Image (spheres, helix red, strand yellow):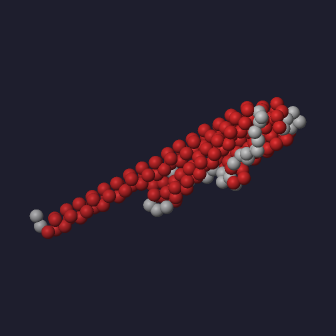
């Protein structure tokens, strides 16, 4: 065996090691992309659960207000229409806008309680309001987690070297869910006082 054979063998070994290192790096990057995409999907599922819960609470809230506020039909109907619009929105941006309008409508509906002392004293209304506030809090947390997951995922799909694999395997950027303003993100609490 001459020095030339050793040199060729060393080059082949080096090439094989370099190829193996690139393959391992590609597998690791691909797996990170998959984990990140799965985290985004899971986070969206959490938002979807809270939105469904909100959608289920709205008709009960409308019904409770309707029993006391017979002259507020326009507000009650508007909230029903906002709910229908939010439930029918398909893409994330449109759904975010529709959900923001629904949250504002629900806030107006709850604010009606100030005009109706019997409604403010209703245990059914109080329980619905507590459930809705809890749902809004969970939704706000889920929104922040989702948007953080989307930010991390989108960063991976746009930065080198993971963007190369993202392009090859069609990992597409995901949209953020609404950036709700502080006044819309929280359902207003009505001062209900104490019932004697």
Residue at point 49%, 61% (across, down):
159
On the image, the x and y values in percent for residue 27 come to 38, 52
Residue 113 appears in the picture as rendered: yes
On the image, the x and y values in percent for residue 33 come to 46, 51
Name of the residue lying farthest toward the right: 71
Location of residue 110 by image quarter: top right
Residue at point 82%, 34% (across, down):
118
Name of the residue lying farthest toward the left: 1
Residue 17 position (above or below residue 117): below
Name of the residue lying farthest toward the bottom: 3
Q: How many marks?
A: 0
On the image, the x and y values in percent for residue 87 come to 69, 38
Residue 62 position (above or below residue 92): above
Q: Quadrant of the N terminus?
A: bottom left
Q: Quadrant of the C terminus?
A: top right
User: Residue 8 versus residue 126: which sits nearer the camera?
Assistant: 126
Residue 41 position (above or below residue 21): above
Residue at point 69%, 54% (across, down):
182
Location of residue 195 by image quarter: top right
Location of residue 109 by image quarter: top right
User: Residue 31 versus residue 190: which sits nearer the camera?
Assistant: 190
User: Residue 194 versus residue 11: which sits nearer the camera?
Assistant: 194
Residue 97 appears in the picture as rendered: no
Residue at point 48%, 54% (across, down):
166
């Amino acid at each position: 065996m001459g020095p030339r054979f050793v040199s060729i063998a060393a080059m082949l070994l080096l090439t094989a090691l370099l190829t193996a290192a690139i393959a391992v790096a590609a597998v690791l990057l691909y797996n990170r992309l998959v984990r990140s995409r799965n985290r985004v999907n899971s986070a969206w599922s959490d938002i979807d659960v809270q939105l469904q819960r909100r959608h289920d609470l709205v008709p009960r809230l409308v019904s409770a207000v309707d029993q006391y506020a017979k002259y507020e039909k326009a507000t009650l109907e508007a909230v029903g229409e906002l709910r229908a619009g939010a439930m029918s929105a398909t893409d994330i941006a449109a759904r975010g806008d529709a959900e923001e309008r629904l949250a504002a409508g629900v806030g107006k509906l709850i604010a009606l309680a100030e005009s109706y002392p019997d409604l403010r004293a209703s245990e059914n209304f109080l329980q619905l309001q507590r459930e809705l506030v809890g749902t809004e809090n969970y939704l706000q947390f889920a929104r922040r987690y989702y948007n953080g997951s989307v930010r991390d995922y989108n960063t991976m799909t746009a930065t080198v070297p993971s963007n190369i694999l993202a392009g090859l395997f069609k990992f597409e950027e995901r949209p953020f869910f609404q950036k709700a303003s502080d006044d819309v993100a929280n359902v207003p609490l009505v001062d209900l006082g104490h019932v004697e």
